[in-house]
Image (cartoon, rainbow, N blue to C red):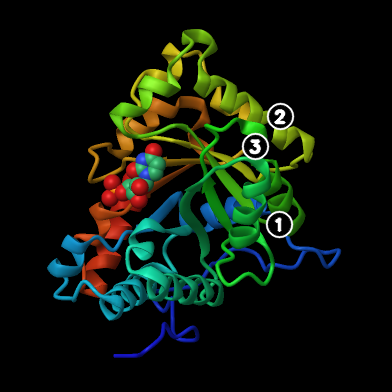
Amino acid sequence: MPSSIPSGSLGAGGPRSGPPAAEGPDGGRVSFGARLAAAMEARGALCVGIDPHPGLLAAWGLADDVQGLRTFSQTVLEAVAALAAAIKPQVALYERHGSAGLAVLEELLAASAQAEVLTIADAKRGDIGSTMAGYADAWLREGSALAADSVTLSPYLGFESLRPALDLAAANGRGVFVLALTSNPEGASVQHVGGSESVAKRIVQAAAQENQRYAAAALGSVGLVVGATVGNALRELDIDLAAVNGPILAPGLGAQGATGADMRATFGPAYPAVLGTSSRGILAAGPDIAALRAATVETLASLK
Ligand SMILES: O=c1ccn([C@@H]2O[C@H](COP(=O)(O)O)[C@@H](O)[C@H]2O)c(=O)[nH]1
């Protein structure tokens, strides 16, 4: 068993058609939105979540320790790096192993960059602006050990409190996904407040403004999280996701019950910008790499 995630041997799952190179024509990094749009075009609109729950580690015959975590992460990356538009490690499930768990996450992020698959660190960070600058530095600064292509953010201290992350992401060709309508049923008790002028609608409008501010040509780099399970909420709350011009990360596919057909009905005209994400629904097929790939291909097909 290797002691760290190897970077050179990953993503051997089939013909490579990865995201564009990180360097733009002016020597700067191509924006996250443009890189994600290219990856979705080339591979399809699926993000595979890497959620090393204790129960999954056990089901895979792995110990609930740092070596189990590393083997799990390495196996999923090897299986899906060439198939998925992005991977989304669930940060909480690395944090629960302490500093050694975070070191495995650092290895996974570095190996994913080598394997040319985009990363979404699902950290759901949010705090007052001065502290937010610390989170931005950790997840979005060039050279940070935990730097990912993008990170999930919670706007419930006010959208503008996210400013340090929004600005650092834009400066570095990275992206963010801001929680708007989450996939869990409890989210409605906060996010639906205000009816046709709901909290969620304000978040969506703020993200749209942000993408305009940076004059995103194709797809902006300020994305939203909208659950695949939200049903009619977008219509009930009069929310126009198509106007956001940013990617919509949609958890809830698979283990939480949503299907590709549900997603097409839920998102309507915004569907081309939707990146479905599934964790347990795909991970349950492991640890066999061929089975993980088959589950990924099947999920991808359901999204077409
Ligand atoms: O609204 C949200 C935001 C984030 N998540 C995260 O996505 C995955 C879903 O896992 P499944 O196994 O596919 O259900 C998990 O990491 C959540 O924390 C979400 O579910 N809903």
Left or right, 14 with reference to 119: left
Q: Quadrant of the N terminus?
A: bottom left
- For the question of whether residue 128 can be seen, the reply is yes
Q: Amino acid at mark 2?
A: Gln
Residue named by callout 2: 209
Distance CA(mark 1)–CA(mark 2) = 18 Å
Question: Which sits earlier in the primary sequence, circle 1 or circle 2?
Answer: 1
Q: Are marks 1 and 3 in contact (CB under 8 Å)?
A: no
Q: Residue at x 60, y 30 (%)?
A: 158
Sequence order check: which comes first, mark 1 or mark 3? 3
Residue 291, horizontal then vertical, whole percent: 22, 68
Q: From mark 1 to mark 3, how far is it between C-alphas?
A: 20 Å
Q: In this view of the protein, which residue sits in the foreground, 208 or 156? A: 156
Q: Which residue is mark 3?
A: 161
Q: Callout 3: few (<14), some (14-19), or many (20+) C-alpha neighbours within 10 Å?
A: many
User: Is residue 273 depicted above or below 90 in this figure?
Assistant: above
SS for dot 1: loop
- Image location (x, y in percent) of residue 169: 68, 52
The amino acid type, in three-letter code, at marker 3 is Ser
Q: Closer to the observer: label 2 or label 3?
A: 3
Q: What residue is shown at x 58% (from left), y 59% (from top)?
A: 139
Q: In the shown orientation, is residue 53 left or right of residue 28?
A: left
Tell me if residue 303 can be seen: no
Give the residue pinned by disc 1. 173
Q: Nearer the viewer, residue 237 or 258?
A: 237
Name the spot of residue 39 as percent of width and height, x first.
55, 57
Query: Real-space Cα distance between discs 2 and 3?
Result: 15 Å
Disc 3, SS: helix
The residue lying at 51 percent from left, 61 percent from top is 119
Give the secondary structure at mark 2.
Answer: helix
